[in-house]
Image: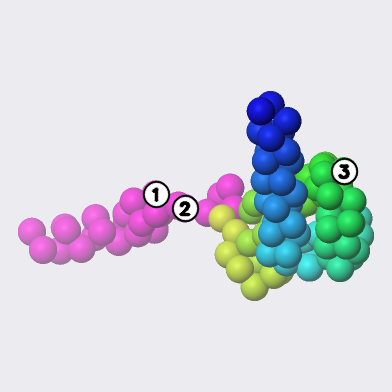
Amino acid sequence: MPSVIIGLALLALWLYCLFDVITTPEENVRNLPKFMWVLIVIFLADVGALTWLLVGRPRTRHAMYAAGSGGWAPSGDAPRGPDDDPEFLRSLERRLRDED
């Protein structure tokens, strides 16, 4: 029974890494071309999956949404919402004063 559980866990790890390699944008893959990582994960199974996690995967999830890849990446200085934006709060105060 424990060998079945270990086998299922290794299969889940392998599938997770395979889908992760496939869905990671080419420009965010580290150290090797994406095609090579797919082959390594497929043919080396669990060793390839662990190697992908340690060496090939992007360091952070935010790297996948970097502005260079056409996505949006929140920066540390940018407001996260309208209530955090000082310019929006100033304009709101001006509008409220004008209505009184």
Label annotation for residue 47: 3
Q: Amino acid at mark 2?
A: Pro
Farthest-out residue, bottom: 70
The quarter holding residue 5 reads top right
Q: Amino acid at mark 1?
A: Asp
Q: Amino acid at mark 3?
A: Val
Earlier-in-chain disc, 3 versus 2: 3
Q: From mark 3 to mark 2, how far is it between C-alphas? A: 42 Å
Q: Is 81 within the magenta? A: yes
Nearer the observer: mark 3 or 2; the answer is 3
Q: Looking at the picture, does residue 40 appear above or below residue 54?
A: below
CB-based contact (under 8 Å), mark 1 and mark 2: yes
Q: Quadrant of the C terminus?
A: bottom left
Residue 72 drawn at (x, y percent) = 58, 64
Label annotation for residue 84: 1
- Along the viewing direction, whichever of 13 and 85 lies nearer the viewer: 13
